[in-house]
Image: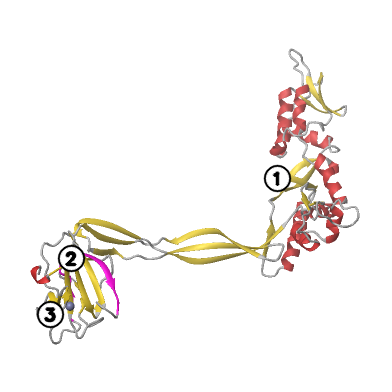
Amino acid sequence: MSKIKHLNLIKKGLLPLTSIAFFGLTVFYWNNQNYGLALEYDGKEIATVPNEGIYRKASEMLTNQLDPKFKNVVENNSPNLKLTATNKTKCCESPKDVKKKIIEKSSDEFSKGYGLYIDQKIVAVGNDKQKIKETLNKKLDKEKANHPGWEVKFEENIEIKHGIFEPNQVKKINEIEKIINSKTDSHHEYTVTEEDTVENLTQKLNMTKEEILKASNATDGNICVGDKIKEEKDLLNVKIFKINTKEEETEFSTESTVDPAKEETYKETIQEGKNGKNKVTYETILLDNGQEETKQTEITVLENPTNKKIIVGGKEIENSENLIWPVPFTKKVTSPFGMRGRSMHNGIDISVRGIAGKDIVAAGNGKVEQVFYSGKGYGNHLIINHGNGKKTLYAHCQSICVSQGDKVKQGDTIAKMGTTGDSSGNHLHFEVRVKGSPQDPQKYV
Ligand SMILES: [Zn+2]
């Protein structure tokens, strides 16, 4: 508790003195007089200046030595300086001399020192910069020794800056060390909920059981739901972390350019794609509860990916007026279109000895509408849509070399001859359908 009180005291009067600049306000103008100006400190003359300007310059130099952030902050602590008229005209002291004299003569009121600033807020003043640094490092070293393999640094921004302070503000190093290891006097209060246990509170608030009891308003020594606990946070917090750097690949994308002069089935790669490489930095932080949290903190591009470039055709394939024979190997029809006994044969069967595995080609330009793989009925078969309500079907294939949605041109190989499904030998069952109804293919090809 004494640490907190101590901090409060410091807070009140720890800013560097800046007030000397205000002194200029008491200066008179001494027009038409042969007098110089005597600069008095506590009633004693410390310098004679020919005019107010020299004094102003001196005080300006003094002020400039002070931290600019704290100029115009303290108005009450003005040293007892005065300018009066004097007929002594020995004068002619430079502003630099005057500044020096002000500091010399007012050593009771001024003390040079080093302010320790945490996140721009001054928390202590010492007169040995090196010792302040060592004390800070001691705190870091302790954490580093407790966490081998990890790096340590302060979470807060720390600065040690030279300045002019009141002598009683300057502390001995052991007092500064106490401040460095103290808690903040934060006013944040935690309200105990039904789910809280002493164990989870010690974790949540990062306080010991005793600290919690002390900081709570519990009068009977028991923590109850609704009790308020004043959270204590360390003034200076050490971050325990690891930095990891990895090289990671970045995937290329594909840029396609449409060539309207080429047919839709056209596709040409003009540049192969290549993945890029990034250097990625990750920071892993060790949390109070022992868990680790990893974040990506930096990305450096080592190599940009090279995009794959392709040209695709944009010209729609025109419907073919006429269909062609779908089996280049033979024109032999083994079963024609029409009634076959009592049932209707919706297509023609094409077959000859040695036909197995031979090419089946698209009878016209079009789009593969459906591809079926089956062991029954038509077996492996496909339907090509030629537009204008015209479709062709190719059944009992051994294999099919196009996929649903593919654009095909008349004469493209689309499948191989086989005997899949309800079939008694290698043959192509070929159908032509116009607006859904089967037609005699021999009238079309
Ligand atoms: Zn058939």
Kindly indicate the quadrant of the structure image that contains residue 62.
Answer: top right
Residue 144 higher or lower than 129, as above or below: below
Q: Secondary structure at mark 3?
A: strand
Using the image, determine if residue 374 lies above or below residue 45: below
Q: Counting residues from the N terminus, which is met first, the one under dot 1 or under dot 3?
A: 1
Question: Type of residue at label 2?
Answer: Ser
Q: Nearer the viewer's eye, disc 2 or disc 1?
A: 2
> Earlier along the polypeptide chain: callout 2 or callout 1?
1
Q: Which residue is mark 2?
A: 437
Residue kind at label 1, given as amino acid type: Gln
Disc 1: which residue = 120
Q: Quadrant of residue 435?
A: bottom left
**In which quadrant will I find the C terminus?**
bottom left
Residue placed at 76% from the left, 64% from the top?
Answer: 142
**Label 3 lies in ligand 1 vicinity (Cβ under 8 Å):** yes
Name the residue that disc number 3 marks. Answer: 335
Report the magenta residues as a range.
Answer: 358-374
Q: Is residue 112 magenta?
A: no
Rendering coords of residue 285 (x, y %)? 65, 62
In space, the residues marked 2 and 1 are separated at their CA atoms by: 87 Å
Would you place residue 52 above or below residue 236 in this image? above
In this view, 365 is above or below 187: below
Q: Residue 242: x, y in percent?
A: 63, 65
Quick one: which residue is furthest to the bottom in this view? 353
Q: Residue at x 14, y 82 (%)?
A: 351
Q: Earlier in the sequence, mark 3 or mark 2?
A: 3
Distance of label 3 from label 2 (alpha carbons): 19 Å
Whole-Å distance between the Cαs marked 1 and 3? 97 Å
